[in-house]
Image (tube, rainbow, N blue to C red):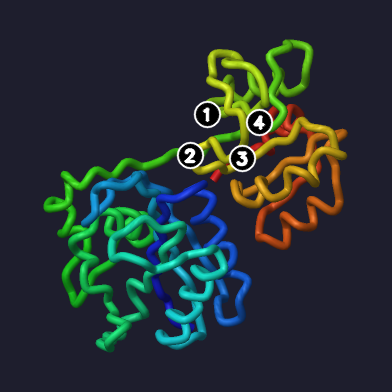
Amino acid sequence: MIEAFIGLGSNIGCKSGNIRRAANRLLQFDGIQSLELSPFYRTDPVGNVDQDWFVNAVARVQTSLSARELLELCLEVEREQGRVRKERWGPRIIDLDVLFYGTEIVREDDLEIPHPRVRERAFVVVPLLDLAPEFSIEGEPLRSCLPGLEEQGIVRMDPVVAILGASEKPDRYANMAQKLLVEYGHVVRPIAPRGNEILGEPVLAKMTDCNEPVDTLTLYVGSARLPAMLEELLELCPRRVIFNPGTENAEVRRSLEEAGIETIEACTLVMLKVGTFTQR
């Protein structure tokens, strides 16, 4: 097995969801034994600055694929997610770059490893160092590049908990869960079709209005409503989805798991009280 690093970026649509979907998809292919994803970062565009901000991350994979096969796999994932290559440094729904492939050096027309601009890009250096703090290139510690990258505009994005079916009514379980999540130190994003604010937090009208990486989505909507929401659930692509009592839907749960999303049938309130509600 070879240890390789892949850079991921998106600035169209549900950006954090696009990155997690791409990572989940990579892990489904033969030849990718394991994948570890760095924290997500909000970054300024490079080159063409007249476009929306990006979310970037780096994945560390263990692979039996060759460098060329790994590149082709990345391009396939881009195509599956609707990437159309029009302009260099232009907006993209997803971008995957093979940054390093073991210690190999590759110099071909359409494949250069190590990636030629790694040392110049904070959105690569910072998340890669999260995964491999002692990483070096040809004997030079990657960390030595940091002082020259301080002004590139990169901000770590903390994962959040989203509540689908949030309620302003104190007697609703969704409201109780939001209150307890905040008490336990979680950043919460309530999602509901109506309302401006719940417990001091602005209400998001739909899931994909959340610009932050969603670690956990906890459900408080009726089971029969979930199939109509599946497409948006997959686009948001949280790390896990909690089906609270009364929201269980086997078909939706199966579809989420097939997309690499962890699912749990449990009560969020109970998980918090017994200490099993943990974030990554």
Labels 3 and 4: the sequence-earlier one: 4
Residue 54: percent from left, percent from top: 36, 49
- Label 1: which residue? 187
Q: Which mark is residue 163?
A: 4
Q: Is residue 186 above or below residue 18?
A: above
Q: Residues within 10 Å of mark 2 (few under 14, many from 20)?
A: many
Side of 131 relative to 235 (left or right): left
- Label 2: which residue? 212
Labels 2 and 1: the sequence-earlier one: 1
Q: In the structure shown, which secondary structural element does the residue marked by tag 2 occupy?
A: loop
Separation of residues labelled 2 and 3 (CA atoms)? 18 Å
- Res. 120 image quadrant: bottom left
Q: In this view, does 118 lie above or below 62?
A: above
Separation of residues labelled 4 and 1 (CA atoms)? 11 Å
Q: In the rendered picture of this protein, how many numbered marks are placed on residues?
A: 4
Separation of residues labelled 2 and 1 (CA atoms)? 10 Å
> Do tag 2 and tag 3 residues touch (Cβ < 8 Å)?
no
- Label 3: which residue? 278
Q: Is residue 204 above or below residue 121?
A: above
- Taking the view exactly as shown, the residue that stands out farthest to the top is 170
Which dot, 3 or 1, sits closer to the camera?
1
> Do tag 2 and tag 1 residues touch (Cβ < 8 Å)?
yes
Residue 161: percent from left, percent from top: 59, 34
Q: In the structure shown, which secondary structural element does the residue marked by tag 3 occupy?
A: loop
